[in-house]
Image (tube, rainbow, N blue to C red):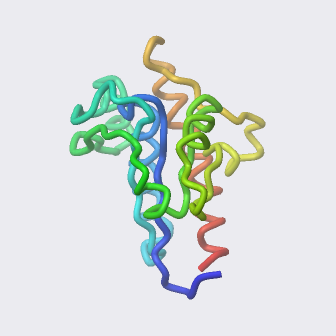
Amino acid sequence: MRNAGTVRRVLFVCLGNICRSPTAEAVLRQLLTQQAPDLPVEVDSAGTADYHIGAPPDARSQRAALRRGIDLSALRARQVVAHDFTRFDFLLAMDRSNLRELQAMRPRNSRARVQLFLEYAPPLRLLEVPDPYYGDAGGFETVLDLAAAASQGLITALQEMA
């Protein structure tokens, strides 16, 4: 167990880092600011694939988030790198496919928790955040709702570690 005040680092991971993981990053940041401003947490997001490196979040993700007062426009997609497994305490995958990718990439000496993000929202009875990329606008709203629910559980877990 770390000392109180130790910064916890959280990396959200999806496939391309333009929909689900940047949304989760921004939602957690907002909730930390509102509910636990003194909790030392760093948040980032990345993708397992290199499809969109350097691109901003999907415009539909940005619009849905802005309707809730969350600005994603400054975020840029990047790919998970080996150093992430030592830099971050938590690598939280949006679905089982990305979890498998992370587990395959994980160095043997990594102590990071590599798990599904929705494990922090047991009442939802879901384990995967569905990819909204090929769907309609409602899918982006669903991602925001799921990210908010799981972020609440994650904040509680982080507070218990402090």
Above/below status of 130 relative to 162: above
Above/below status of 129 relative to 148: above
Side of 118 relative to 51 (left or right): right
Above/below status of 62 relative to 68: above
Quarter assignment of residue 154: bottom right
Side of 14 relative to 65 (left or right): right
Task: Please name whichever residue, 14 or 71, is drawn nearer the observer in this view of the structure.
Answer: 14
Side of 64 relative to 157 (left or right): left
Residue 15, given in percent of the width and then of the height, sits at: 46, 29
The residue located at (47%, 63%) in the rendering is: 86
The residue located at (35%, 35%) in the rendering is: 67
The residue located at (25%, 40%) in the rendering is: 76
Task: Please name whichever residue, 90 or 22, is drawn nearer the observer in this view of the structure.
Answer: 90
Task: Please name whichever residue, 52 or 157, is drawn nearer the observer in this view of the structure.
Answer: 52
Residue 55, given in percent of the width and then of the height, sits at: 23, 32
Residue 99, given in percent of the width and then of the height, sits at: 61, 38
